Image (spheres, rainbow, N blue to C red):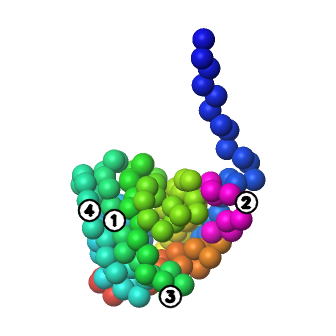
Amino acid sequence: MAETVEAMPNPSLLGELEVEIEIKAPAATFYHIYAGRPHHVAKATPRNVQSCDLHDGEWGTVGSIVFWNYVHEGQAKVAKERIELVEPEKKLIKFRVIEGDVMAEYKSFLITIQVTPKEGGVGSVVKWHLEYEKIDENVAHPENLLPFFAEMTREIDEHLLSEE
């Protein structure tokens, strides 16, 4: 009887990173730009994101495919992502990168965005959480993405406040 052995991921190739950014916009408003209208991200932060197109499904629904054109560290890049999880009550959305530049160095790459109202004050906290598996030991952890997400978040916040 043949046995199939599934290779367990090497723990040293797995990683998680996160960054939290305080913003002035209400949590629901910021969450909605990713869950309901991510194509507006390009309008809010054009230096970082040139476009976001829906390739399959509907905005903000699990299984939908979203295609991003962005610039990171001066390089034009692309990412094709599938929406894995949408939890409006928690203001949480997860995207799994399925194609694009990131996949040259990572076997898997999951991005979670969660927005929570700031306790006892105005505004919110946006948490970007990355879970990934590198293709090998020579690949660096993607810490260089954290300032990118932070800058993008601040620019989206400014854009949302200017819309009010």
In terms of image quadrants, where is residue 140? Answer: bottom right
Left or right of residue 40, residue 3 in this image: right
Q: Which residues are magenta?
A: 131-142
The amino acid type found where label 4 is placed reads Leu
N-terminal of the two: label 2 or label 1? Answer: 1
Q: Which residue is mark 3?
A: 74
The disc placed on residue 54 is 4
Looking at the image, tell me whether mark 1 or mark 4 is earlier in sequence order. 4
Task: Work out how far the residue at label 2 is from the one at label 1, CA to CA, in angstroms.
Answer: 28 Å
Q: CA distance from mark 2 to mark 3?
A: 25 Å
Q: Which residue is under mark 1?
A: 67
Q: Amino acid at mark 1?
A: Phe
The answer to whether mark 4 and mark 3 are in CB contact below 8 A is no
Q: Position of residue 56 (x, y in %)?
A: 25, 54
- What is the x, y in percent for residue 106? 58, 59
Q: Residues within 10 Å of mark 1 (few under 14, many from 20)?
A: many
* Three-letter code for the amino acid on which mark 3 is drawn: Gly
Specify whether residue 97 is painted magenta.
no
Q: What residue would you read off at disc 2?
A: 137
Q: Return the residue nearer the eye: 66 or 152.
A: 66
**Secondary structure beneath label 1:** strand
Task: Report the Cα–Cα distance between label 1 and label 3.
Answer: 19 Å
The percent position of residue 11, horizontal first and vertical second, equals 74, 48
